[in-house]
């Protein structure tokens, strides 16, 4: 049986080295690339087409969610396990929307992480029950928020509001949505006009009040 091929992505050298040593020492795994930022991870997955991407949530250049968005658009068969030091309901809910197959905490035991990757490679998923319950509550709140916001904003405008609230700049939004930066500015102008607000700070407050993030 061929080994499970992996791309590892984490911005901490010690963590990345530890992950590499774990999978290198375990039969049945093959590490194809080790990446320090999201852009490197995305390039490595597109180049090597691994079975599993083990992806840190917080990466420079492109964070884990941005990588997941790009992989979703590429429709690659690589399955992703999100690796994180803490649980963020909003980020977890978004990751699950984007098709992440598993979530593992960095303080998990090596044996659990190996089992997680094996299960994900075989087509299964790996989510803690408490995590799923918490994420479901968050998702229901967001669904209510989207319903309220959709009375005023279009689906694309709501998407841009979320991305602004996540801290993305116009250039990053344009790249992820594959539209021009000028189009992003037009959308933002329309959003500000519809909501009768003055700028990004007020827009973030709006998103927080409605639980859009």
Image: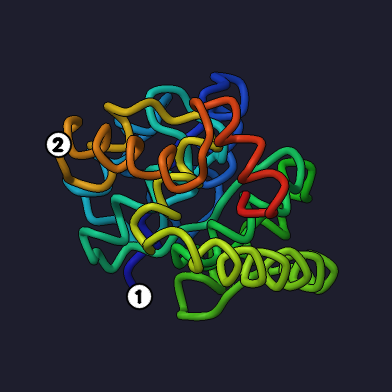
The percent coordinates of residue 130 (x first, y second) are 85, 68
Q: Mark 1 sits on what residue?
A: 1
114 left or right of 34? right
Residue at image location 61% in from the left, 21% down from the top: 14
Q: Residue 35: x percent and y percent? A: 38, 30
Along the viewing direction, whichever of 158 and 58 lies nearer the viewer: 158
Q: CA distance from mark 1 to mark 2?
A: 46 Å
What is the tally of numbered marks visible in this picture?
A: 2
Instruction: Residue at 61% x, 45% y: name it.
Output: 207
Q: Front-most of 24 and 11?
A: 11
Compare residues 91 and 56 and report the one nearer the observer: 91
Q: Quadrant of residue 174?
A: top left
Callout 2: SS: loop
Query: What numbered label is drawn on residue 81?
Result: none
Image quadrant containing the N terminus: bottom left
**Left or right side of 65 for 173:** left
- Residue reaching furthest bottom? 123
Residue 29 drawn at (x, y percent): 44, 56
The residue nearer to you, when weighing 35 against 170, is 170
**Quadrant location of residue 175?**
top left
**Dot 2, how many residues are within 10 Å of its Cα: few (below 14), some (14-19), or many (20+)?**
few
Q: Residue placed at 73% from the left, 38% from the top?
A: 85
Give the numbered dot on residue 180.
2
Residue lying farthest to the right in this orientation: 130
State the SS at label 1. loop
- Rendered residue at 60%/35% (across/down): 204
């Amino acid at each position: 049986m061929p080994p499970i091929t992996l791309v590892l992505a984490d911005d901490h050298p010690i963590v990345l080295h530890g992950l590499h040593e774990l999978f290198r020492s375990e039969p049945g795994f093959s590490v194809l690339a080790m990446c320090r930022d999201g852009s490197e991870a995305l390039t490595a997955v597109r180049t090597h087409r691994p079975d599993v991407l083990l992806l840190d949530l917080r990466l420079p250049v492109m964070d884990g969610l941005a990588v997941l968005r790009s992989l979703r658009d590429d429709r690659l068969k690589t399955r992703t396990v999100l690796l994180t030091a803490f649980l963020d309901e909003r980020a977890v809910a978004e990751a699950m929307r984007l098709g992440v197959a598993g979530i593992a905490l960095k303080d998990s035991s090596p044996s659990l992480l190996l089992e997680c990757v094996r299960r994900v490679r075989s087509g299964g998923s790996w989510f803690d029950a408490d995590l799923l319950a918490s994420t479901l509550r968050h998702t229901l709140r967001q669904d209510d928020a989207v319903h309220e916001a959709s009375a005023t904003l279009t689906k694309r405008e709501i998407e841009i509001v979320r991305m602004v609230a996540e801290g993305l700049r116009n250039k990053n939004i344009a790249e992820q949505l594959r539209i021009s930066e000028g189009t992003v500015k037009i959308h933002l102008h329309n959003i500000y006009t519809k909501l009768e607000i003055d700028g990004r700070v007020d827009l973030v407050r709006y998103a927080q009040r409605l639980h859009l993030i």
